[in-house]
Amino acid sequence: MTISNNDFHYIQNILHKQVGIVLGMDKLYLVENRLTALAQQRGLASLQELLLQLRTRPSPDILQDVVDAMAINETLFFRDEPFFETLKTTILPDILVQRAKQRTLSIWSAACSSGQEPYSIAILLREYFPQLRDWNVRLIASDISSTMLARSRKGCYTQFEVKRGLPEFLRHKYFQRCGKEWQIKAEIGKMVEFNEINLTETWPSLPALDLLLLRNVLIYFDDTHKKIILNKVQRLLKPNGYLFAGTSETALNRLNKQLKIVQSGTIVGYQVQ
């Protein structure tokens, strides 16, 4: 049975109230698929039974399960190859020159989902910037989903997942077989700190940032929540630090006048004025 418009609006309201996520009507099919899978995981007979529980007994655990189910974003290793190439050849070298005296580097991968983005960054740092072994490097990754964070910390990926964006020589160098899966090696895994962070609520203590990846995240929020998030970002970024959002998340300086556009080739980012 297809989810009704009334039920869809109810889920919309839950997500907006809990985490500030805004779902358009084009996500109805996605909601139906993911919540049907959640109903099965919880041992319920149907999606309608899950919706009935939500309406009559909205316990914290079922609300969290709904948020987890809907907050999962598709990701892959080295997603958007031109972006990672620009990181390697332009952005990170510029940051390292700026921080040469302090020998510190702070990076945050926000909304990291199942961990491919922060592990891609860790591999990039280890493979191409060996001088950082003597630096104080903090690579923070966060997500709103405790389920995704548990998976990220484990660092195990299927054959299909490691073939998506990950060059074979890096897979053999930085992963090891774990049954039918591939697990990130400890030398990379220990580089990443995983934290559960709701971007629309109070953030934990975070270091001043040289690089913040907020890619393919802001599209899920309305302008009010975008402004709240960007105001926090502005206060966290170091002088000459970089913010990168997704390719479709443009004109962020419209929402925060302290952000200025910086461009390297086709890659657009932001710095604090």
Image (cartoon, rainbow, N blue to C red):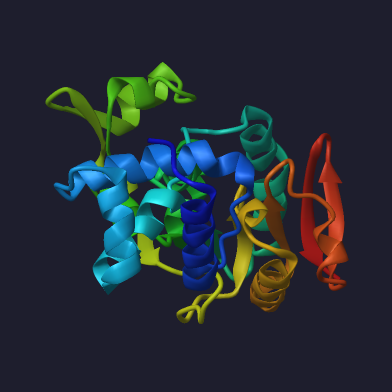
Please state the horizontal and vertical placement of residue 73, each as a whole percent of the image.
Answer: 48, 43
Image quadrant where residue 90 sits? top right
Residue at the (29%, 40%) spot, across then down: 37
Residue at the (70%, 70%) spot, across then down: 230
The foreground one among 129 and 167 is: 167
Image quadrant where residue 179 sits? top left
| Horizontal relation, residue 260 to residue 39: left or right | right
Residue at the (63%, 68%) spot, across then down: 101
Above or below, comparing residue 158 to residue 259 in the picture? above
Could you tell me if residue 210 is visible in this image? yes
The foreground one among 229 and 128 is: 229
Above or below, comparing residue 163 to residue 84 in the picture? above
Please state the horizontal and vertical placement of residue 204, each as a whole percent of the image.
Answer: 45, 79
Could you tell me if residue 65 is visible in this image? no
Please state the horizontal and vertical placement of residue 238, each as a whole percent of the image.
Answer: 69, 72
| Horizontal relation, residue 86 to residue 254: left or right | left
Please state the horizontal and vertical placement of residue 100, each as a whole percent of the image.
Answer: 64, 62
Residue at the (65%, 42%) spot, across then down: 87
The foreground one among 183 and 144 is: 144
Quarter of the image for the N terminus: give it.
Answer: top left
| Horizontal relation, residue 230 to residue 167: left or right | right
Q: How many marks?
A: 0
The foreground one among 44 and 18 is: 44
